[in-house]
Amino acid sequence: MRSAGPGSFDHNHWEDAKMGQATLPAVSLGKVIGFLEILDDLGGQCDIYRAATALQMELDDILPVIEAGQTLGFIRIENGDGLLTDDGRRFLRSDINERKRMICLKIEEIGLFKELVGILRSKRSARIPRAAYLSGALKGMYSREAEDLLHTIVDWGRYAELIGYNEDTDEIYLDQPITL
């Protein structure tokens, strides 16, 4: 893929990519991991409504956390219960480096991350201005929704040591890959 220039962005590439991309819930990994730990403490299964009540959360607030856990393959839902998957159990029992590796492998399969990493790899600097990403990949979204999604992408990408964000230059960059 050729680069259009240091501050430019290939909008057509993103338009093609968005067709098959799943949405990513705007939830921090910390909340997802916390919910996984609660599920584990409850024997790996709990009623979603009761979990929300016990956590003093509205059901609407806990559903994105569960959706994020499902996106990562750590939670599944059956008959109104949240169930910890084998991958979720393995994640919880892993050390921090293995957790990062697991998250990295999972998010590399998510459309938004695949495309972002592809764009970053196509750039000599392996960097893209935040504004270019927002106007390209997240084009058509409400401003607040796009900002929330970008925050989630950076949060998950940083945890996995896949991507980073430089606040001084306002750029997203490809992080050094972790050793698998």
Image (spheres, rainbow, N blue to C red):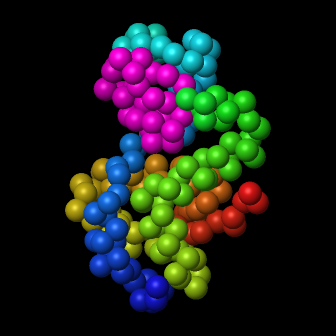
Quarter occupied by residue 82 = top left
Q: Residue at x 39, y 48 (%)?
A: 24
Q: Quadrant of the C terminus?
A: bottom right
Quarter occupied by residue 134 = bottom left
As displayed, is residue 85 above or below residue 158?
Answer: above
Q: Residue at x 39, y 21 (%)?
A: 78
As displayed, is residue 106 above or below residue 50?
Answer: below
Residue 49, image x and y in percent? 36, 14
* Nearer the observer, 69 or 73: 73
Asked if residue 171 can be seen in this view, the reply is no
- State the count of labels: 0
* Nearer the observer, 115 or 28: 115
| Residue 75 on the magenta span | yes
| Residue 12 on the magenta span | no
140 with respect to 122 (left or right)? left
As displayed, is residue 76 above or below residue 147?
Answer: above
Residue 140, image x and y in percent? 22, 62
Q: Residue at x 35, y 77 (%)?
A: 13
Which residues lie in the magenta part?
56-84
